[in-house]
Image: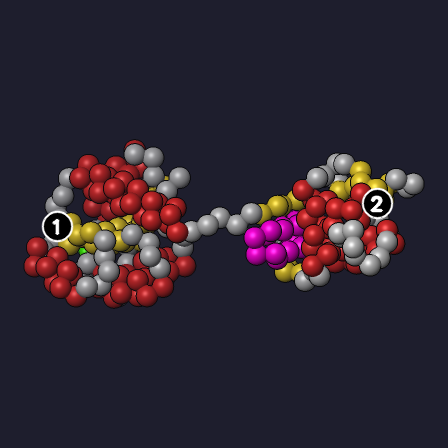
Amino acid sequence: MSKILIVEDEEAIADLEKDYLELSGFEVEIENNGRGGLEKALLGDYNLIILDLMLPDVDGFEICKEVREKKNTPIIMVSAKKDDIDKIRGLGLGADDYMTKPFSPSELVARVKAHLARYERLIGSSAQVNDVVEIRGIKIDKTARRVWVNGEETNFTTKEFDLLTFLAENPNRVFTKEELFREIWDMESIGDIATVTVHIKKIREKIEFDTSKPQYIETIWGVGYRFKV
Ligand code: CA
């Protein structure tokens, strides 16, 4: 669900905008002063910001400028004065749209929808989503080849990474050491199935709380290893 931030000091207007946007299925947060609005806009994760120009503390010009330096979140600026809108345009602050109060709430909703759709097309075409495997506190980003154990990034060698990823992607299945060796090391590799044992030990030291009682990679005696879900 898209999340929208309204920075508006006139509470009646903010509430009206919120009601209409919520009716259209958006999640909405209101901030009534400039400083709070700037903080939320910079730190929060919003899909769009509706920004009033005249605000206590920090005005809409400043907020728009600072947000644009760090984020591409669509911004619709609103003001009671037509002159202000011309001024905003002239300043080139990077706002995506401008509206003069009073405006009809349905007009606002229509513009919000249009900007969200445009922005989603924009990021959809440029951003790539990383391929991530997540199992009980272990997060493996296959695209970036990075691993987090309980939120903490942990370094793995190339083969450790490949082995952990293979097991995590095929949970609840037992693999023999021979199978794992064939899967992770190519045939010309120097080494043998003992290499697998050594790598499993290294991986366990990095992911297990207690390596004598593994919670992730189990040893199935006489057979091989299994990643537990
Ligand atoms: Ca105002």
Kindly indicate the quadrant of the structure image that contains residue 79. bottom left
Residue, far left:
83
Q: Which residue corresponds to the image point at 82% horizontal and 52% vertical from the top-left?
A: 196
Q: Residue at x 72, y 39 (%)?
A: 171
Whether the magenta-drawn stretch holds residue 140 is answered as yes
Decide which of 96, 81 is in the foreground and name it: 96
Magenta region: 136-150
Specify whether residue 23 is painted magenta: no
Looking at numbered disc 2 in the image, what kind of residue is underneath it? Glu
Q: Is residue 15 above or below residue 98?
A: above
Pointer 2: residues within 10 angstroms few (<14), some, or many (20+)? Answer: some
Q: For the residue labelled by badge 1, is the local secondary structure a helix, a strand or a loop?
A: strand
Quadrant for the N terminus, please.
top left
Q: Nearer the viewer, residue 175 or 203?
A: 175
The quadrant in which the C terminus is found is top right
**How far is mark 1 from mark 2, CA to CA?**
71 Å
What residue sits 13% from the left and 48% below the top?
101
Residue 199 position, x and y percent, is 80, 56
Find disc 2 in the rendering and name its residue.
178
Q: Is residue 97 visible?
A: yes
Residue 149 place in picture, x, y as percent: 67, 55
Which residue carries the number 1 mark? 100
Amino acid at circle 1: Thr
What color scheme is it? secondary structure
- In percent of width and height, residue 185 lies at 76, 52
